[in-house]
Amino acid sequence: MIETSAAALRLTGRGAARRSELFEELVALLVGEGFARLTLDDLAAQLHCSKRTLYGLAGSKEQLVRAAVVHFFRRATARVEAVLAAATGPAERLAAYLRAVAAELAPVSPQFFDDVAAFEPAAEVYERNTRAAAGRVQQLIEEGVSAGVFREVHVAFAADVISSVMVRIQQRQVAAATGLADAAAYEQLAELLLHGLQKAGLSPGGLKPA
């Protein structure tokens, strides 16, 4: 994950609790409405605070946005990994991972994703997280092949194809081509992968049906 620096986001020191609360409200606002059209005056009005208070968090709107995007993906990653840790069996783990990603992206507004794609510092955060997620999927496929649950596929090639799709989702190309929201695209990717990788005669849990 990408970390923010203390200079970019100031959530420590005197008044830290209120700043942290305000930052959470800011993240929710940006995720729900996007950020390109919002000025600092707009943000201050919607968050019921002063611009000076926002400058107490970061030195500019751009720094605030990038910090909010980092925070969103860091929190999403932690929840996705928690879901993965609770899953057992290679097929369940792969399905759980991709569906957890979809669940994290589902509440996010299309405008937020469009704005992230158009704002290079935020797009870079999303891209790095997408690459990390693609690497996680490759690891999960390798686990399934090694366990004999998935078919013997060329894992590097499969991972490259999956990574390409995930990057296209991140860059809004899938949304433009299909109309699918990012969360729905990850749901579809999960279905394609499970059906394509699963050995004949095995259930999604990797067991032969009764």
Image (cartoon, rainbow, N blue to C red):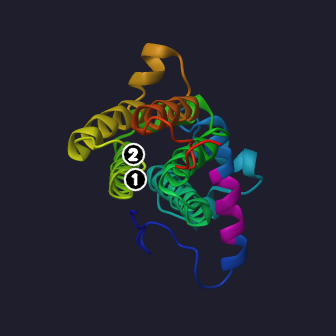
Residues at marks 2 and 1, CA–CA distance in whole angstroms: 5 Å
Q: Which residues are magenta?
A: 19-27
**Which amino acid lies under the numbered mark 2 shown in the image of this protein?**
Phe
Q: Quadrant of the N terminus?
A: bottom left
| Residue 111: x %, y % from top left | 57, 30
Q: Residue furthest front?
A: 210
| Residue 48: x %, y % from top left | 78, 53
**Which residue is painted at 73% across and 57% down in the image?**
49
**Which residue is painted at 59% across and 60% down in the image?**
87
In the shown orientation, is residue 55 left or right of residue 163? right
In the shown orientation, is residue 209 left or right of residue 94? right
Q: Is residue 26 magenta?
A: yes
| Residue 16: x %, y % from top left | 66, 78
| Label 2 neighbour load within 10 Å: few <14, some 14-19, many 20+ | many
**Which residue is painted at 45% across and 17% down in the image?**
176
- Image quadrant assignment for residue 184: top right
* Element under disc 2: loop
Look at the numbered discs 2 and 1 and tell me whether their residues touch, using CB distance below 8 Å. Answer: yes
Q: Nearer the viewer, residue 75 or 99?
A: 99
Q: Quick check: 104 above or below 173?
A: below
**Which residue is painted at 54% across and 60% down in the image?**
71
Q: Is residue 164 magenta?
A: no
Sequence-wise, the earlier of marks 2 and 1 is: 1
Q: Residue 150: which numbered mark, if any?
A: 2
| Residue 159: x %, y % from top left | 29, 43
Q: Quick check: 158 above or below 20?
A: above
* Element under disc 1: helix
**Which amino acid lies under the numbered mark 1 shown in the image of this protein?**
Gly
| Label 1 neighbour load within 10 Å: few <14, some 14-19, many 20+ | many
In this orientation, does residue 41 appear? no
Residue located beneath label 1 in the image: 144
